[in-house]
Amino acid sequence: MKFSLGAIQYYWPKNTVIKFYDSVAASDIDIVYLGETVCSKRRELNLKDYLDIAFKLRESGKQVCLSTMTLLESPALLREMARYIDNGEFVIEANDIGAVQLAQERNLPFIAGPAINCYNQHTLKYLVNSGLKRWVMPVELSRDWLKTLLEQEVVRDIRSCFETEVFAFGHLPLAWSARCFTARSEDRQKDQCELCCINYPKGREVHSQDGKQVFVLNGIQTQSGQRYNLINDLPSMHRLVDIVRLSPEPEGTLDWLNRFRENIRGKHPVKLAAGDSNGYWNRLAGMLTVET
């Protein structure tokens, strides 16, 4: 089982991003995803910056992937996505079906990110035939669902053609919208947002009237209010999951990586914090926590 670090979901200053990936280079993470996947207005780093980071990470022994945008709203964004796909060095994580099409047209392998709606064996086979080499399971699905899918005859025949990756740590990306909810929460219009999401390095919390955190606003992306944490569910992933993904947080991400590695066989369980959950993996409501 390998561990990956997903693309940073939040809007961080350029110097913060560079320092973060300097520490990642010195870590024992296996795979790193780079790129802006949420909002095209976030331009602290451009493709050249990400490529510079990618080369440094590759020199330190990491496998590097470039992640594409999830919601494309203009021809300019399509052209920018094509530049990522045509980088010539690194495999891409497709977070939009348009990226899958462009990769297929260029006969390039790709990774299907969790935003790709792959919920059955027929879609998975279609993606494999299109060039899929790794598949990140949609975040709201369970271990039982994954096991059932991988046991389907059509999937057994192609199982050696792709790796399976599971989002296992971080606030879950649930939905994307043409509206920017962070800007709206500050009474700003989307076109005049002044990039206010940079003021929320881990998103902006949304609470219910009884004080319970229900969502995190991250620009046009809505995340789960609770942090998903499958550290104690790792033993149940054996023979099903090839790669376990952690999503970067402003603090402590690499410490959590070490804890995940220590508990890969379930011998060093961690008591989950009050704000953590693992419901989806255990076929329950996502906000619930199961002691395993």
Image (spheres, rainbow, N blue to C red):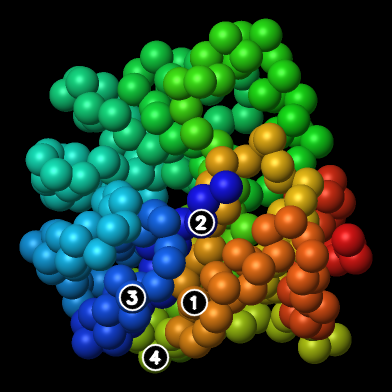
Sequence-wise, the earlier of marks 2 and 1 is 2
Cα separation, mark 1 vs mark 4, equals 23 Å
Tell me how far mark 2 sits from mark 3, CA to CA: 15 Å
Residue under pointer 3: 26
Tell me: 282 left or right of 110: right
The residue tagged with tag 1: helix, strand or loop? Answer: helix
Q: Picture quarter containing residue 14?
A: bottom left
Q: Secondary structure at mark 4?
A: helix
State the CA–CA distance, disc 3 to disc 4: 28 Å
Please indicate, yes or no, whether residue 79 appears anywhere in the rendered image. Answer: no
Which one is in front in this view, the residue at disc 2 or the one at disc 3? 3
**Res. 199 mark:** 4
Q: Is residue 31 left or right of residue 276?
A: left
Asked where in the image residue 212 lies, by quadrant, the reply is bottom right
Q: Earlier in the sequence, mark 1 or mark 4?
A: 4
Q: Secondary structure at mark 3?
A: loop
Residue type pointed to by label 4:
Asn
Q: Position of residue 225 (x, y in %)?
A: 68, 73
- What amino acid is at disc 2? Phe
Residue at point 57%, 53% (across, down): 244
The picture places residue 95, in percent across and down from the top left corner, at 39, 44
Marker disc for residue 3 = 2
Q: Is residue 234 visible?
A: yes
Q: Which residue is mark 1?
A: 254
The mark nearer the N terminus, 2 or 3, is 2
Could you give the CA–CA distance between mark 2 and mark 1, rounded to whole angstroms?
11 Å
Q: Dot 2, crowdedness within 10 Å: few (<14), some or many (≥20)?
A: many
In front of the other: 55 or 262: 262
Q: Is residue 235 above or below residue 46?
A: above
Location of residue 33 in the rendering, given as x and y in whole percent from the top left corner: 35, 57
Instruction: Tell whether label 4 touches label 2 (CB within 8 Å).
Output: no
